[in-house]
Every structure is written in C-alpha cells, then in structure tokens.
Image (spheres, rainbow, N blue to C red):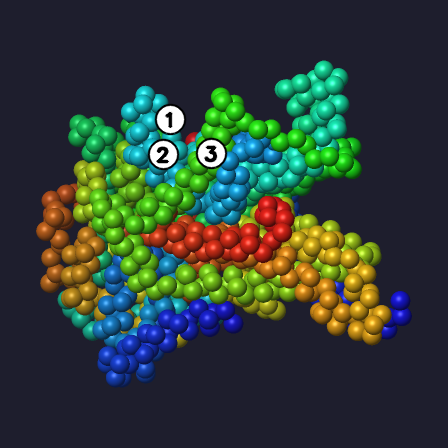
Amino acid sequence: MTRRISLRGAALGLALAVAAASGNALAAGKVVLYTAHNQSIIDALVPRFEAETGIEAEVIKAGSGDIINRVLAERDNPRGDVIWSIGGEQLEAQSGLLEPYRPTEADKIDPVFMVGTNWLPYTAIVNVFVVNKEKLDPSQYPRTWKDLGRPDLKGKISSARADKSGSSYMQLANVLTVYGDGDDGWAVYRPILGNFVLSGSSSAVSRFVNDGEALVGVTLEDNAYKYVQGGGPVEIVYPADGTVAAPDGIALIKGAPNADNARRFIDWALSKPTQEFLVAEMGRRPVRSDVKASGDLPPVSSFKVVRYDFGWAASNKGAFVKRWQELLMTQ
Amino acid sequence: MTVPRVARLDLWRGVLLLAFAVVGLLLVYPLYNIFAASFLDNETGALTLANYRRVLGHPYYQTAIVNSLVIGLGGMVAAVALGVPLAYCVARHKVRGRAVITTLAILSLVSPPFIGAYAWITMLGSNGWLRGFLSDLGLELPSIYGPLGILLVFGLKFYPFVFLLTVGALNLVNASLEEAAENLGATGWRKLRMVTLPLVLPAVSAGALLAFVLSLADFGTPSILGRGYRVLSTTAYNLYTSEIGGNPGLASTASIVLIAISLVAVAAQKRLVARREYASALTRRPAVRSLEGVRSWVVHGLCYLIVGVSSLPSVVVVYNSFRNTSGPVFKPGLGLDSYRKVISDVPDAIVNSFAFSSAAVVLVVGLGTLIGYVLARRPGIAAGALDALLMIPYVVPGVVLGLGFVVSFNGPPIELVGTGAIIVLVIFIRRLPYSVRSSVSILRQIRASLEEAAINLGASPSRAFVKVTLPLMLPGVLAGAMMAFVTAINELSSSIILYVGGTVTMPVRIYLAVLDGEFGTAAALSTVLLVTTGVAVAIVLRVSESREGSFV
C-alpha cells in the first residue's frame, strides 16, 4: 500500500518526462540496483543513466555486507538486478549468487582486473592513509602499515569495522597480504587495531580526519580524494610497504527480474564515458585500458602495489573476521 | 438504562478483540521471538544459556552494559538538573516570555535527538566554531565524541519531560503547606527541600524515569557520537547487522538485557513514589513571586540559557543547510546547494516519510481512540489486561522491536520485510499506547452521562459515541494525532533496521548522511523535518487546552 504511494510520484514523473524526451521510454522498464556507492556518486550517476537509456533505476543503498545478506536472503525470489560497486572479495565469496556476463566492450577492460569468477571489475581501488596536514607534521605521517601501530598514534586513527565494511576488510587483508596471514601478520595487525577508533562506515573515515577528530584515517583513495578536491586540510599517503590495487565489482544477480536492463546497466557502467566520468568527478581509477587515471592522482606505477588474491581473501574471510572480532574483544 | 445489550457487546467487544489481536501479533509475538532467540544456539538451534553467559560474562559486553547504565543514569541526572530548576523558576516567578520558554522546550523535546548529535559535532567537534570560540576565551573542552557528548545531547533533549511534568506539579501544590512550613520557621532552601520538592517528587521522578528509559533506548545519538564508546542499543544493532557472524542470538540477548534494565527502572520509580501520592485539595494556588534586581537577572538568565542552548542545535542545522558545499566540505557563502542535492536525490525519503507517518497516524488514532474508550468507560478484566500489555512499548527500545519484526515477519505466514507496511506497523504499535493514554485522559474530562442521555433518547451506543462523545474528544484527538505524527516522522531506531532502499525515510537518510560525512545533505533534510515538526507542534498548541500536557 505504502510502497505504491512512495513510488508513484517518482515513477509517474519520470515516465512522463522520459516519454516526452525519447518517445520509446515507457517500454524501457526499470532496473533495481543494490549498491554500496556513496550517495554523492549515486546522485551524480543514476540520473545520467536514466536520461541516456530511459530505464528507471531503483537504487538500494546499503553497506556491502547488508547487500550480500539481502541477495542471499532473496536467493529464491530475487528482487535486485545488479550489485553495483562492492568489494571484489565479497562478490567472489558469493559468486554462486551471480550470473556471468560478458559486457559488449569486454576487450577494452584491462585484463589485470579480470579476476572475478562471475563478476566484473568496475573501478580499481587503492587502500590509502588520509592524514590531517594541519594537525600532523609530515615527519609524523605514518608511511607504512607498520607505522599505524606506533604508540604515538593510539586513539588517533579512524577506521571502519572489518566485520561491517568491505573496504575495511580489504585493509585487514592488505596487512595480511604484506606480512603473511599467520601469527606474524596478525602480530603486525594487533597494535594497529589497538590504535583504531572504529566506525560503522568507511565513508566516515575521511570526514573524521578532515574535521580533525582523527589525525589519520585508513580508507579508499577515492573517498579521501573527495576531501582533497573539496579543499579540506587532508593529504593522501600511499603505504610504502605495499597497497593492494584491487577492483571493486559489478555483477548481474542470478535470476534478476529485469535481467536485460541489468545487462544494459552493466554495459553502461563499463562504457568509456561513464568510466571517464568516474575518473574525472569521483577520483576513482578506471578499469578500462583506454581511460587514463585522473591527472591529480599519481600513476599506479609510482607506489608499491602488491598482488591481491581474491580467492584467498574470500575463502578466509569467515576465519579472519572471527579472529579480528576476538582481537577487538581482547583489546 | 435500557440499552440493547447485544449491540453494546458487539461494538466494544469487537474493539477489545481487535486490540488483543493487534497487540498479540505486533507486540507479543515479535518480543516472544526475541526472547526465544536469546535462549537458542545460532547454529544448532538447541536450548542454551550460552548467550547470556557471554553477554553477562564477557568484558566486551559488560562494558556495553556499564556504558548503557552510565548514559542512562547520566542522561537522567542531566535532564533533572536542567528541568527542575527551570520548572521552579517558571512556576514560581513572574518570568517574562513564559510561553516562549515553554515552546522552545517543547521544540527541543520533539526534534529528533540525532539532529542534536549532528549539530553539536559541527559546534564542538575538533574544528567546530563554538570550540574555537571557547578556546579563544581560554576554555578547552573535552572531545564531543564519547560519553560526555552523548550526555550533553541527552540532557538537552530530555530535560523538557522533567520540566513540563514538574511545572504541572508545582502549580498543583497547595500553598498552605508551604506557608505552614514558613510559619514553622523553614524558609528558602530548607522549605524547598523539606516541603516543596517531596511534594513534586512523583512528577520529577516520572520525568526522570522517561529520561532514563529514553536515554537507554536511544540508538542514533550513541551511534553517531559514541565512536569507540559502545552501549547496548548499538551493540545489539552491530551484532545483528554484522556482515559475517551476524549473531541473532547474542543480539536478542543484548535486547533482553536492555528491556530488563528498563523494567527495573520502572519498578524502582514505582517504589519510590508508592507512599507519596499526595492528593491536593487545591484550596489555594501557590504564590507567584515578582522579580526584581539581581534575582530577576539570575532567574531570567538561567531560564533563557537553558532553553537557548537546547535550541541551538536546531538553529545550527538550519544555518548549515544553507551553507555552500563542495562535495562533502563546507565552503564560505550561503546558497541552496544542499536543497538542490536533496531534491535531485529523488525525494523518495521525503515522500516516504510523509506517507508512512500519515498511514501510521491514521491507524494509531483510529484504534487508539477506540481502545481508550474501552479502557475509560468499559473497565473489566480484559480491559485491564490490555492496559497492562500496552505498557510494554514504553520499555522496549525501537532497535529491539525492529529486530523482533525482522525475525517475525521475514517469511510465511506473514512476509513484510522490505515493504513500507512493516515500517508503518512498527511505528503504529510503538505509538499506540500514547494515543490510548491520551484518549483515556480526554475521556475522563467528558462526562459519561452525556452519552447515556443520548442512548436514553434512543440512539444506539455506537451512534451515541459517534454523535456525542467523539465530537467532544476531537480537539484532544487532533492534538494526539499531531503528536503521534511528530514522533512517527522522527522515528529512527526501528526503521534503521527495517528500511530497504525503496522505503528509506528522512531520519534514516539523515543518519546515513551523517555517517557518510555528507553534512550538507543531512542539514537540509533535517531542516525539512524540523519545519514539519514545528508546524505540527503549532497545531497542537492551538487546538489543545492543556498545552504542555499534550507533550508528556
């Protein structure tokens, strides 16, 4: 009852507007997108997609964990069509929920990113530190993951929870990739976690650093870059002991009710104009070989990149998160 | 009375049956499921006490329990410390702008608490303007994040409960008692402590109880301001939504502990006031003193300081909504950036909020009025039992009921998860008791004999109710409906668990925006909420006779 009320205005208005504009749009239907994108990215992209294709996009924004849980819960009766921009290792772990799709311009995607079983790379993601340059002298910047465990940074580093945020899990996996996933790696991670002030969402991390609540944040490059672009007092540091350059993904949900529109959305998301837009406006790194990274961002070749094993990150996730939770509870 | 007995039984027994069905399905059943889940092993489904051993025994959860008590008691103390002096100033002195003070207090009461949390971050965060200003004066404040910030928000949010209830009680104190005290030599502070305060203790403690229970149950404020500081409500939420190892058993157990603490508080308050029911013959109203000189400055200063500071968040939110933004960063200058963004963001959240709240209010007021009638005019064992059941929502936090709804309605026979209906229903059942209680108190002021006269003149009982009693109830019911609307449209703690993308509401969107650091968007949506709330409150003040009484 109420759902109809909520959709009516938007659906009618959009249908009329689009019908007037393109003539054939009423038949275009809709596509349901599950996304962990920031609202600002959704706001910038979705109207473009709708205007270009005449397809109405219904966006459901949630944390990446919530999205996976939802798709799992709806397995027998899928209500979503596309998972849009969540961490590759989460898609890898649940690749059984996904339907493989080869996009029309698959040959333009850089093969180093084509690592997913049933999902596609969407943008390349880099783990970075974001530091407040007004409150921290460059000599005090943490330069490596190990530095994050320094005693003088106790309570001064903002991070999301690895059991709630896909990017935060990737940061944990980053440390374990560099230092090993045995006791050695965890010994490096333990003081780091001890220095963290945790939040639910990784989007908040840069905000805390920008506002001076935290001196250092561990987050994704694009999120930190928004604050650099906005003129905030922040700077990006690339960990010298190695950052994983991994794609986040886009995928067609198995049994998607609007599968054809879903494929059109995926093609659109991987198209050159959209990827260029993501680079220019969002500070994301492209997965297409014919699109260059933003001029402000250093090329991937200028910092140390370590190979990220999605299969390993996905298959060990349960155990790692459990160990992370135990570590947290014994701080 | 010669009333056709069958007709009467049909209407009001029908209402009772419906009420029991609704309460059973939407309250007892979800809570039973939570209760049951707390005794079950997540994996094997076997009966176990392991969840309780863990929640009560592990230092991690013990910290959450202790922290919950700290902010519950702290929020209560802060609310009393602000509310009682304000009430004493306003009730016993000729204060200029009394209506302004009361209205500002009411507005800070009905605005959503997490708006306060967000606004205080922009004021007292590390680079907040107020912190900078105070720092220039040589006053360095501790961080807004953590328990102190939470208590600041709770104190300023919940003091109006204490204030409104205490003013009411102070006005009812028999002046002879205080005069007797004076004649016996007790003046000033001693009279206040020995006579006046004990007389208003039931009212003060009722306000304090409300502040305690609501501080304990609040989700948005500790979630936004807590950071590392975990309390039971945020812990239950995290336990439930955790991506891996989401733990319904532990989440349910934390919920039950939360309810148990609230119940203990209710019992403690009952015990405290048990032997202190003072019937007031109200022969003479207490004296209201004129103010002069220093005393006038102090009293006025105190009153306006309290309501001024508690209104500050609303002012800041409205101002922030007009600031220019560049992405997530505020820029110099004013404009409509944030509003443009909110409107282009498909005004889903706004439309949903109004649709859900209106639907919930129709249900709340419809059933609430009928149940209120039964409780007030047709008391009996069944009505008494219903009355008792309707106490439950007062002590059940929104997060807990939200969890109960997810667990209960996520599949056959009743599948509601993901719909707008589930959000409407959870708001409905949470607000129903308030509506029932307000109908009861309205009906106590309307004489039953009027309706009986109509029946004696040949009207059927239902016709008599509709034609005679209902019109008399209307102003009160309208005020109640507006209050239900205000609380419905500001609801966060249950809808945060029940919303999906298509059913997102303004408070949820604001909460997510604050978490994402999108402060401009949050401010613009908050302003829409604040204006809506303000209009509804203005209607209440206009139609309601016992102005302040409608709000507590």
- Of labels 2 and 1, earlier in sequence is 2
> Is label 3 in a helix, a strand or a loop?
helix
Q: Would you say A326 lies left or right of B429 here? A: left
Q: Dot 3 corresponds to which residue?
A: B304
Q: Nearer the viewer, residue B15 or A306?
A: B15
Tell me whether the residue at label 2 lies in contact with that at label 1, contact meaning CB atoms closer than 8 angstroms: yes
Which mark, by number, is residue B251? none
Which one is earlier in the sequence, the residue at label 3 or at label 1?
1
Q: Which mark is residue B141?
A: 1
3 and 1 marks on the same chain: yes
Using the image, name the chain to which the residue with label 3 belongs: B
Amino acid under label 1?
A: Leu
On the question of residue B46 being in view, the answer is: no
**Percent position (x, y) of residue B218?**
52, 44
| Local SS, label 2 | helix
The image shows residue A23, relative to residue B513, as above or below, that is below
Cα distance between the residues tagged 2 and 1: 8 Å
Which is more toward the observer, B284 or B229?
A: B284
Label 2: which residue?
B124
* Horizontal side of residue A236 vs A313, given as left or right: left
Looking at the image, do the residues carrying marks 3 and 1 touch, with CB atoms under 8 Å apart? no
